[in-house]
Every structure is written in structure tokens, then in C-alpha cells.
Amino acid sequence: MATAARVREARLPPPPLPLATLIGRELRAGGSERPALRYGHAGFAKRGEDYFLVKPDCLRVPGDPSSVFSVFAVFDGHNGVSAAVYSKEHLLEHVISALPPDIGRDDWLQALPRALVAGFVKADIDFQRKGEVSGTTATLVVVDGFTVTVASVGDSRCILDTQGGELQLLTVDHRLEENAEERERVTASGGEVGRLNLFGGQEVGPLRCWPGGLCLSRSIGDMDVGEFIVPIPHVKQVKLSNVGGRLIIASDGIWDALSNEAAAKACRGLPAELAAKLVVKQALKTSGLKDDTTCVVVDIIPSDHLTSPQLSPKKNQNKLKSLFRRRSHSSVGKLGGKSASFGSVEELFEEGSAMLEERLGRNLSLKAASPPFRCAICQVDQEPFEGLMTDNSGGYCSSPYAPWGGPHLCLECRKKKDAMEGKRSSRSTACR
């Protein structure tokens, strides 16, 4: 029995390593050089509601080029373009405003998942103030060196293709038809889930939530549906090895036509710009132009694969291509496994809960904490006793709300939180 137990223990994957450990290991190994990024995008419009964002030269510290990070995103709008356009223009600034100032890179990366949650919720609140009924999916990808952080609501998707041909899905589809956990959450929060009911009782189409009739359980905007359609993103953070990898970020116009494996296989061996075009072309060839199709491809390439003096330009190009060369279908790994099972990727963080207390109540032990009466979502400072209380230990209370275990929220953000959890409504709803 003892021998069998030792065998079982030996088969268990190693636990994820702390980010600081991984960065330290990289520095000690001489791998402090940042990878190069190559990216491309392509798309075809049917309704004109897809938008994308490419910002390769963001800075954590203004004026310091060593603090560069890059952001890529896809927004698939519905019921108009307003929510997608707003998210493209403002979502990133809301995320950045939720990050503590004057902290180092490792603390910044550890704080990023929490800031992404706050930024998505802030974007949703601000957009809904406009009174427009448009909504959008959002898949936002932050690349800092070999660390990749992805936040997503809706059914746009991001996959990671590594040198060995293994694929990892870095997002979760929030489609009611396919996500049983989201169906349970929506009904528990007071929504109804069912198909479109025609005259005579015939049910057609995918599962939708009512009121509103939306097929998704998470989005930004959608003011005319229930508050149980939440903007709280699934967030995953991974650390690539120094061999790099390829990210494919695309709207559901791609994923409804192609599997993850088919999309990755269609563009292996090609530079990023051409790869994005080939993915779109393959999707259109498979199903035709039934929906807007948008694809962004990002290659994370070790710097020595680009600047090695021993390689002639032709040999250098061949070495770069070997990172993403075409492989047989049988060599493609399965999705959904823990990153510990992949030699080239370490999983640092993953959380998909729709409860703000679980999402905002973590990673609070940073060196630079927010002021005690700054709202963790909208970043507005308040005087003590103004509006709403802080957490249980603070002792401040404002009727009709009870204490909660998370950080301080202003009155409007607390109202939003309670509405998303089905405790009260912060707006009227109407079917469409």
C-alpha cells in the first residue's frame, strides 16, 4: 500500500511556482532579455460589430522603456457597436487605474488579475450610464516578457500554441448552451434560462437567459437584460518558457467555424500577419461569412531567434519559422489540462468566479496598498462614513447594506455588486 501511495504521489503534477520564483530563475539563467513580439490581424465584416485593439508599447513606468508591456484585445459587439467601441477606447485605462502605483514588476503582475476584474466592472458601470442597450464580449491579453495574462467575458477566445504543438485554451466560453456552471449561476441569481418559444410551444435555437434573450452569461453593457449577465471576467495568467509561443485571439466568427486545433494548424509555419489572414480565410472557407470574423495573432519570440549573429538572414528566418512549423494533427495536445503538464508553460493564476468578494478580496498584501476609503472598482476616494462602509474589520456601516468581506466599495459599485448576485436590482429590465 505504501508503494502504491508513493507511485500516486509521483504522478501528481507539481504545484504552480510563485511568479517571483520564476522571474528570479529566469534572471539567474541569464534570460533577462525580453522576447520580441510579432503580431498581425485580419477580419471580414458582416454586421460591422467586431473591433480589436493592438497597443504594443505600453509602459508601467512612464519614460522607462524597460517597463514595456503590450496589450491585444478583441471585442465582438451585439445590438449595435457602442459597447464594443467604448470598451476598445476605455477598458484598458480602467484596468490601469486599478493597479497600485509605484510597485515593481512582480507585484504589478500579481496585482493585474484583480485590476482586470475591477476594470471590467468599471467599464460596464460607466457604459451603462449612457443608457444604451448595446453589449460586447471582451478578450483582453496583456503580454509582459514571457508572462501572459488573459481576461475574458463572452465567447471570444484566446488560445496558446507552443513550440511542441501543445495547445492551451486561456479563456472560458460564457455561452449558456455549453456552460452548465453559468446556467446554474444565472438561475440562482433570479434569471431564467430557456430557448426561444414560438407560437404553439415549439422551442428553437440556443439556450438564452430571460429577460433579454441573450445567449451569453457574461458581457460588458447589455443594459436591457438582467443584472445576472455580469462583466466579471475569467482571468488566467501563465508564464511561457524561453522558447516562446503563439497567441490566437479571435471572435466567435472564427471559433464557430474552426476548432482550436484547426485554427492553430491552419497558420503554423507562417509569420503573424499572414497567419491571421490564413485563419480568417480558413474560417470563411469552412462556413462562409455568417458573422463578423476577427483574428489577432501574436508571436512571442526569444530575442536570440531574431538577432543571433551566427545566422545568415535566410537561416535566421528558418530558425524563427521552426518555432511554429507545421506538425501532424496527431502531435497536437489536448486542451484544458493543467499547465504543469506542459513543459513550456507554468500556470500562475486562474479564477473564473462571478462573486466580487472572491475576486477583489485577494492579492491585497502588496507593498503599496490603496487608501482605505478608495473604491476598489471605480477608484473614487471617499471620506469616512460617506456613502458606504468598508469591510468587516473597518466597522463602518450604511443602511440598507450589510458588511461584506471585500475591500471598500462606493455606494454605486456596492449596489452593482448586490444586483449581480441577485440581492437587488440596480436598473429596470426589459425583454428584447
Image (cartoon, helix red, strand yellow):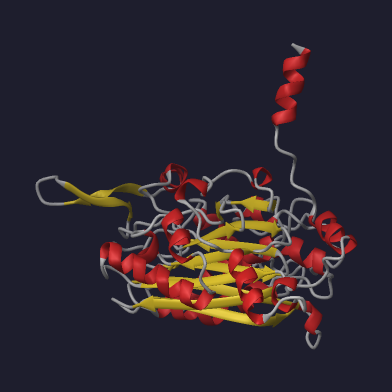
Q: Nearer the viewer, residue 355 or 405?
A: 355
User: Could you tell me if residue 131 is visible in this image?
Assistant: no
The percent position of residue 119, horizontal first and vertical second, equals 61, 69
The percent position of residue 121, horizontal first and vertical second, equals 56, 66
Q: Residue at x 80, y 80 (%)?
A: 66
- Image quarter in which the C terminus is found: bottom left
Which residue is most to the top? 1
Q: Residue at x 45, y 63 (%)?
A: 156
Q: Nearer the viewer, residue 19 or 208?
A: 19
Q: Residue at x 57, y 59 (%)?
A: 160
In the rendered view, does 197 fall on the left or right side of 193? left
In the rendered view, does 298 fall on the left or right side of 276? right
User: Could you tell me if residue 54 is visible in this image?
Assistant: yes
- Height in image: 9 above or below 50? above
Which residue is most to the left? 200
Which residue is most to the right? 28
The percent position of residue 377, horizontal first and vertical second, equals 64, 67
- Image quarter in which the N terminus is found: top right
Quadrant in the picture for residue 394: bottom right
How many numbered marks appear?
0
In the rendered view, does 205 fall on the left or right side of 412? left
Q: Nearer the viewer, residue 6 or 266?
A: 266
The percent position of residue 261, horizontal first and vertical second, equals 45, 54
In the rendered view, does 372 fall on the left or right side of 302? right
Q: Residue at x 32, y 78 (%)?
A: 45
